[in-house]
Amino acid sequence: MKGDNFKIVSLYSFFPFQENLIFDLKNKLLDIENENYLSGLLIFASEGINGTICAKKNVIDIVINLLNKYTENRNLNIKVTFSKKKIFKKLKIKIKKEIVTMGIPKINPSQDKGTYIDSASWNKLIKNQNTIVIDTRNHYEVSIGTFQNSINPNTRNFSEFPKWVDDHLDAHLENKNSTNIAMFCTGGIRCEKATSLLKKKGYKNIYHLQGGILQYLDDIPEEKNLFEGECFVFDKRVALDHELEKGSYSICHACGMPVSIQDQKRKEYREGIQCHFCINQFSDNDRKRFEERQKQIERSKVEKNKIH
């Protein structure tokens, strides 16, 4: 794995980020992109920084040093994986109101959050009969892999999570004051913000998996691993297996849903055009557009092969 060409770093940190420094950092990163093969997606907001970057190791080192300077060496919750190919086309930097959108004002994980649980202690916590485990990710992420016996809120995006908490969480709690609430997500950012929300609402005994599923898979050997399936990631790899290598899923380019090898064998599946998830979602004109796009992709592949 270490011999792979590209180093991929997922990171986030909640801290008060001043607007003038946000724009300054953005410009410096775009300068680095112009001179190197730096790609990824970074989100900046007044509450902190979130994202994934992909580049050669020496470029990643430059970027991390720069981020450390702008965040005053705060914990960036870094998770590292490797790939033989670039996993993003280019570098995108977005400036938003939140680094992960929940839509609830006055939630501040840098000031108040749940208790971090490291990978080694996570198994013991979630096996405890007095613990409920909540997957804070989106329904399509949960569908391809999750922890045993975890609750799926079935949300389409993270901003739906607070409503699920209001409508359903109490029904899962035997005792609001003594039941442990353990939450997890891909890299730790969503479950960290979720713990801040629950604390604001008066819930107790709130825990979250430090570093998320990615850190857990890196830390815990296969024979002790309680995560079942693959872990969805928001890049070209689609999902990672237990070895943090590219898994078996691909993306339907019509609707964006992850599709398994079995899904691709279904009669509804047409590469780049439709899958069983979106068979009734699009018009005939949309399908024609998707077909044309797929033809262009295939032509481009043929041309590349001729060059090589």
Image (cartoon, grey):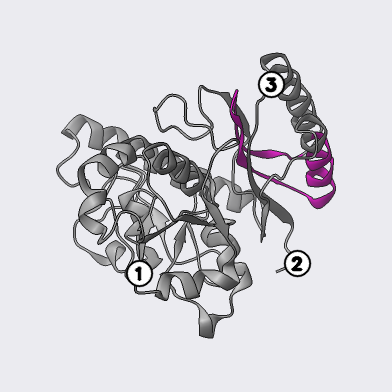
Q: Viewer-proximal residue, 180 or 62?
A: 180
Characterize the local packing of mark 1: few (<14), some (14-19) or many (20 or more) Cα atoms within 10 angstroms: some
Dot 1: element: loop
The magenta-colored residue range is 37-66
Front of the two marks 1 and 3:
1
- x, y (%) of residue 261? 35, 67
Give the farthest residue toward the top.
Answer: 20
Can the viewer see residue 245? no
Q: Is residue 115 left or right of residue 27?
A: left
Characterize the local packing of mark 2: few (<14), some (14-19) or many (20 or more) Cα atoms within 10 angstroms: few
The three-letter code of the residue at mark 3 reads Ile
The disc label shown at residue 2, or none = 2
Q: Is residue 164 left or right of residue 100?
A: left
The disc label shown at residue 22, or none = 3
Q: Is residue 98 above or below residue 186?
A: above
Can the viewer see residue 223? yes
Residue 147 among those drawn in magenta: no
- x, y (%) of residue 242? 53, 72
Q: In whole angstroms, how far apart are the C-alphas of marks 1 and 2?
A: 40 Å
Q: In this view, does 215 lie to the left or right of 193?
A: right
Could you tell me which residue is drawn at 26 percent across and 47 percent down? 274
Q: In whole angstroms, how far apart are the C-alphas of marks 1 and 3?
A: 43 Å
Residue 45 among those drawn in magenta: yes
Front of the two marks 1 and 2:
1
Q: In whole angstroms, how far apart are the C-alphas of marks 2 and 3?
A: 32 Å
Q: Viewer-proximal residue, 193 or 60?
A: 193
The mark that comes first in sequence, 1 or 3, is 3
The disc label shown at residue 55, or none = none
Quarter occupied by residue 293: top left
Q: Is residue 158 above or below residue 306?
A: above
Q: Is residue 292 above or below residue 186?
A: above
| Circle 1 residue | 130
